Image (cartoon, helix red, strand yellow):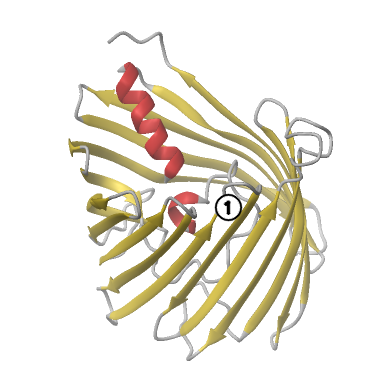
Amino acid sequence: MGALFLLHALAIAQYTPIISGGIGFLDSTNTGAHFVQPVVAPLVAAPIGTHLLAESRFDFREFVGRKNGTSGPYEGTFFKSTQYLQLDYLATPNLTLVVGRFLTPFGTYNERLTPIWMQNFQDAPLITPIGTRTTGSSDGAMLRGVLYAGNAVHVDYVGYSSALSGVPQFQSARSAGDRIDFYFPSTRIELGTSYARFLQNTHYNSIGAHFWWQPWRVPLQVRSEYAHDPHAQGYWLESGYRLSQWRGRESLIGRLEPLFRIQQVFRNSPGPGDGLPSADTKQADFGFIYHLPNEVRFTTSYSRKFSSTGNANIWDVALTYRFLFPMWRGKR
């Protein structure tokens, strides 16, 4: 959400609507099945006075793959989704009230790393569905803000409630939850916990924890999450190291960022329709990002998945472009 908070500040400062987002071409081969996805994901932030901000993000993509998975002619299917469409009321510098459709704030991946221009790996972590059922978005109200801000630690909180909706483009589950984040500026470490209560059909709790670290003097990023619900639990740990210490960030080698992610899911009991692997699964992901000029990124990765339901090799390649511009020249 750091990029979104920056966008909030920019929009409010200028009183000018901002159009941002990404354009990408994704290519993937999973166990012999090849498919491509051209994607357009626009984001709009429009300030309304000094205390209101309307913002939205959409995803439009064409999924092109072989008719029978690994054989037959290529066919395309168009998908569109409203990931969020919300109105933010900035009551105070430490308190924001959100109403509408918003990204479910469980863990960190769903809110911070789902945009195609920010993903290190094309595929989301295996445990992502825990706490974010059913679509990753919620329809309702959310309260977020700062509990404490000192030199040693910042404490942020999020609380939300979501209603059941079956309306196309606005589907969501009845649920409620919260998240608390602790950020330590001196070490650039963030720790947090998440809780969600699924309130339709069989009610159950999901809990999670996350750890992020970005050292001051080293171009390293470490991100990780753990999540648990009655049917499964698991974790993912991801790191990236941009080689900018050799000849600078804009040099040929300084634009390269090797990546690694390890993840594991333990199946506690059958959970039909929960979006998780049906059996215990381990997966290791290796790749790199090449940061081209003008917000263009080339990403490629290889993943090896181990499961009793069958092992798999996954190859991904992506080219993405991030854009950002005002709708018109703003005035204060």
Q: Is residue 274 visible?
A: no
- The residue drawn where x is 30% and y is 24% is 12
- From the top left corner, tell me how far across and down residue 103 is, in percent: 37, 52
- From the top left corner, tell me how far across and down residue 116 is, in percent: 59, 44
- The residue nearer to you, when weighing 208 against 231, is 208
- From the top left corner, tell me how far across and down residue 285 is, in percent: 72, 65
- The residue nearer to you, when weighing 151 against 294, is 151
Please state, as top left, top right, bottom left or bottom right, where the C terminus lies in the image: top left
Q: Residue furthest bottom?
A: 269
**Which of the 4 image quadrants contains residue 95?**
top left
Seen in the image, is 288 located left or right of residue 54? right
**Which of the 4 image quadrants contains residue 323?**
top right
- The residue nearer to you, when weighing 123 against 63, is 123
Seen in the image, is 270 located left or right of residue 179? right
- The residue drawn where x is 49% and y is 81% is 233
- The residue drawn where x is 39% and y is 48% is 169
- The residue drawn where x is 51% and y is 72% is 275
- For mark 1, what is the residue? 215
Q: Is residue 197 visible?
A: yes
Q: In the image, what residue type sits under mark 1?
A: Pro
Secondary structure category for the residue under label 1: loop
**What is the count of numbered marks?**
1
Q: Is residue 314 above or below residue 329?
A: below
Q: Residues within 10 Å of mark 1 (few under 14, many from 20)?
A: some
- From the top left corner, tell me how far across and down residue 199 is, in percent: 24, 73
Q: Residue furthest left?
A: 91
Seen in the image, is 74 located left or right of residue 265? right
